[in-house]
Image: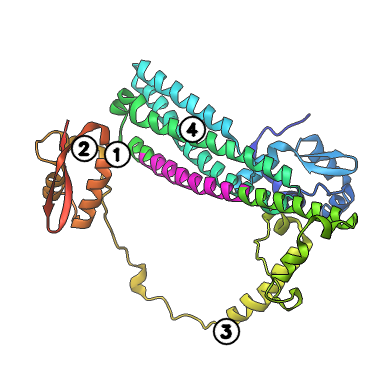
């Protein structure tokens, strides 16, 4: 199969066939893109279709065309529409991270050590990005499964498997956080320059956000599974009632008349029940009916409001003048090291510490709680407490 030897050639081909590729990507889930439809996109030039097939961009099967997996995965990854939860690739990034850390510690040449340090930073960024993408895809899959799958048993099975994926992602997050804090103290003590410090802090923040989102997803899965169990029991009762009615023994074996007599009003006078459920993303993407509804909503609500808007006043020239702003990010590790080098308790140390910028009392109190939580095992928290300005705090010393 001929391929592309230069990236310029590949970009030119993708740009030339962008209309066809965009249409195929939009219909990638329906699998209903016929060769006749593709010819209409390329001005009935069959050679252009053959070129794309021969170069591995699209494939043909039973007079239908599909994007090759390599390009389909690339488009989905860049456009953040991928629904595959890839836990194995995070495990692979963690393996590469450990390998490059080992190489860095064994290497003596500065140039090679710098190379391995950059690889470590790249692996950390990949772990954080892939984990966040997995969490987003997991949330989307959970919602779509509950709203789109009609078979209750299949729906329950899919949600249980998604819950297993959630557990795997949480385990990898814990493994990465442990690696950053405890497993490699020698590496992070010797390779912690400004770039590495910023990368580690960003990764910790991303992993923390991902873990909290996983907790919300776990609650949502439990709620969905409980609803499925309730619906399954209700459906089973309805089947039993229908069977008894078909056998003309409904009143013999049930108390349906007594239950109906207890109702306050006849069913015909009850207000209609309304259930609001958000539509699934798959229906919004692939349904012509959904597309028409969204266009009507835009025409009726958004466009009239946009037409009523008045032009804003001119932007003042002072807005374009350069303004420099400086801010300081407080490093918890440096604060803990500074605290360990003196004898005061943690609260008094933070209240009297001289920062490079102005840090108010509330920020110092937040920093006190953060350090006490993050370095709990390394601190000596005595049984006594103290009070200052109506604030009661624990007395904490270094170990």
- Res. 154 image quadrant: top right
User: Which residue does the numbered mark 3 point to in the structure image?
Assistant: 308
| Residue at position x 17%, y 49% in the image | 393
User: Which residue does the numbered mark 2 point to in the structure image?
Assistant: 336
- Residue 20's spot in the image, x, y percent? 77, 51
Question: What whole-number distance in Å separates the C-alpha atoms at marks 2 and 1?
Answer: 10 Å
Question: What whole-number distance in Å separates the C-alpha atoms at marks 3 and 1?
Answer: 53 Å
Left or right, residue 219 beside residue 2: left
Foreground residue, 82 or 266?
266
- Residue 119's spot in the image, x, y percent? 44, 29
Do we see residue 341 in this rendering?
yes
Q: Which region shows up in magenta?
A: 201-225
Mark 4 surroundings within 10 Å by alpha-carbon count, few (fewer than 14), some (14 through 19), many (20 or more)? some
Q: Which of marks 1 and 4 precedes in the sequence?
A: 4
Mark 3 surroundings within 10 Å by alpha-carbon count, few (fewer than 14), some (14 through 19), many (20 or more)? few
Foreground residue, 144 or 103?
144
Question: What whole-number distance in Å separates the C-alpha atoms at marks 3 and 4?
Answer: 51 Å
Left or right, residue 40 beside residue 182: right
| Residue at position x 68%, y 40% in the image | 157
Quadrant (top left/top right/bottom left/bottom right) for the N terminus: top right
Left or right, residue 349 beside residue 370: left
Foreground residue, 68 or 350?
350
User: Which residue does the numbered mark 4 point to in the structure image?
Assistant: 172
Do we see residue 107 in this rendering?
no
- Res. 382 image quadrant: top left
Q: Which of marks 2 and 4 precedes in the sequence?
A: 4
Q: Which of marks 1 and 3 precedes in the sequence?
A: 3
């Amino acid at each position: 199969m001929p391929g592309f030897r230069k990236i310029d050639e590949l970009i030119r081909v993708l740009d030339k066939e962008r209309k066809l590729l965009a249409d195929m990507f939009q219909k990638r889930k329906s699998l209903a893109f016929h060769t006749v439809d593709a010819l209409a996109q390329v001005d009935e030039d069959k050679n252009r279709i053959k070129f794309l097939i021969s170069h591995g961009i699209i494939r043909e099967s039973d007079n239908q065309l599909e994007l090759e997996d390599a390009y389909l995965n690339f488009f989905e990854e860049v456009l953040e529409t991928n629904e595959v939860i890839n836990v194995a690739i995070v495990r692979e990034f963690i393996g590469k991270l450990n390998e490059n850390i080992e190489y860095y510690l064994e290497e003596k040449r500065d140039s090679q050590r710098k190379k391995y340090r950059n690889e470590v930073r790249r692996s950390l960024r990949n772990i954080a990005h892939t984990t966040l993408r997995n969490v987003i895809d997991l949330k989307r899959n959970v919602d779509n499964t509950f709203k789109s799958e009609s078979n209750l048993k299949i729906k329950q099975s899919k949600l249980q498997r998604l819950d297993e994926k959630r557990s795997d992602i949480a385990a990898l997050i814990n493994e990465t956080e442990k690696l950053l804090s405890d497993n490699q103290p020698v590496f992070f003590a010797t390779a912690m320059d400004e770039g590495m410090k910023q990368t580690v802090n960003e990764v910790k923040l991303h992993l923390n956000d991902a873990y909290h989102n996983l907790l919300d997803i776990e609650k949502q899965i439990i709620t969905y599974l409980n609803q499925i169990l309730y619906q399954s029991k209700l459906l089973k009762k309805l089947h039993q009632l229908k069977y008894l009615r078909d056998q003309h023994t409904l009143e013999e074996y049930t108390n349906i008349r007594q239950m109906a007599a207890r109702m306050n009003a006849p069913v015909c006078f009850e207000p209609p029940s309304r259930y609001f459920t958000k539509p699934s993303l798959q229906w919004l993407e692939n349904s012509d009916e959904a597309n028409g509804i969204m266009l009507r909503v835009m025409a009726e609500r958004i466009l009239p409001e946009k037409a009523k808007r008045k032009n804003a006043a001119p932007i003042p020239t002072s807005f374009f003048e350069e303004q420099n702003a400086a801010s300081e990010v407080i490093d918890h590790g440096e604060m803990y090291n500074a605290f360990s080098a003196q004898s005061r308790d943690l609260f008094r140390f933070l209240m009297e510490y001289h920062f490079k910028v102005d840090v108010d009392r509330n920020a110092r109190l937040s920093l006190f709680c953060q350090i006490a939580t993050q370095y709990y095992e390394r601190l000596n928290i005595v049984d006594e407490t103290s009070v200052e300005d109506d604030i009661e705090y624990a007395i904490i010393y270094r170990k």
